[in-house]
Image (spheres, rainbow, N blue to C red):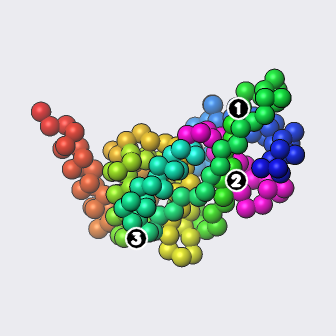
């Protein structure tokens, strides 16, 4: 964290701008770059907003992954960075998340196989994680998928629909659609 402390004068204006843009941006727009930034002086890490939610969400997801032996999903290590009080007069930001960068490929054209899908379904049902858009999934060389958005817990129904948007294979789509229907039937019975 020493590198972050010594570069706060450069870091805070960039993250403030990301915060302003995010407040009015359409997050569904594929050109939206998100609330994260990389810095040359902090190689291998990404700085993000919504720090406390991200860090706590990541811990919650990691526990579920461990407890359920979901060996095809990974969550990056994330650390909560509290902005020193001496900067409070200059920024509305009070904390940042410093997360380990996961190397891999992101993109709408990446496929999710049946084994990965089953593990994501379990993670979604157990936790309610919901934002599994393609830009929040990093496909790693070892066949694992990193979930890099760890603060959006809107419920299983939304999570399953978000996952479904990533799946092209008809049989795998049926698997997710079946889970959605089961969840719908459980929650909407008279």
* Foreground pick, 8 / 111: 8
Q: Which residue is mark 2?
A: 46
Residue at 18% from the left image edge and 44% from the top image edge: 185
Residue 179 lies in quadrant:
bottom left
Q: Name the N-terminal-most of marks 1 and 3.
A: 1
Q: Residue at x 40, y 70 (%)?
A: 113
Residue 150, how many percent across, how many down?
53, 48
Which residue does the image show at 12% across and 33% down from the upper left? 190
Indicate the secondary structure of the residue bearing disc 3.
Answer: loop
Secondary structure category for the residue under label 1: loop
The image shows residue 54 at horizontal and vertical percentages of 57, 44
Say if residue 17 shows up in the picture: no
* Eye-nearest disc, 2 or 3: 2
Number of numbered labels in the structure image: 3
- Label 2 close to label 3 by CB (< 8 Å): no
Mark 1 vs mark 3, CA separation in Å? 40 Å
Q: CA distance from mark 1 to mark 2?
A: 17 Å
Is label 1 or label 3 in front?
1
Q: Residue beneath label 3, please?
A: 113
Specify which label sits upstream in the sequence, 2 or 3. Answer: 2
Disc 2/disc 3 C-alpha distance (Å): 27 Å
The front one of 150 and 33 is: 150
64 sits left or right of 133 in the view: left
In the rendered view, tell whether residue 43 sits above or below residue 98: below
């Amino acid at each position: 964290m020493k590198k972050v402390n010594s570069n706060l004068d450069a870091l805070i204006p960039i993250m403030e701008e990301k915060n302003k843009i995010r407040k009015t941006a359409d997050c569904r727009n594929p050109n939206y770059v998100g609330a994260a930034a990389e810095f040359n002086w902090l190689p291998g890490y990404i700085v993000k907003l919504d720090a406390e939610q991200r860090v706590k969400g990541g811990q919650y997801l990691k526990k579920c992954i461990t407890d359920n032996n979901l060996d095809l999903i990974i969550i990056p290590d994330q650390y909560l960075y509290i902005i020193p009080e001496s900067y409070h007069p200059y920024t509305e930001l009070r904390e940042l998340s410093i997360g380990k960068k996961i190397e891999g490929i992101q993109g709408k054209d990446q496929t999710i196989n049946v084994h990965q899908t089953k593990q994501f379904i379990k993670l979604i049902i157990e936790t309610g994680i919901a934002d599994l858009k393609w830009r929040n999934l990093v496909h790693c060389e070892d066949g694992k998928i990193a979930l890099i958005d760890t603060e959006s817990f809107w419920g299983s129904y939304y999570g399953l629909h978000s996952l479904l948007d990533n799946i092209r294979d008809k049989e795998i789509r049926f698997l997710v659609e079946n889970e959605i229907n089961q969840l719908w039937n459980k929650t909407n019975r008279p």
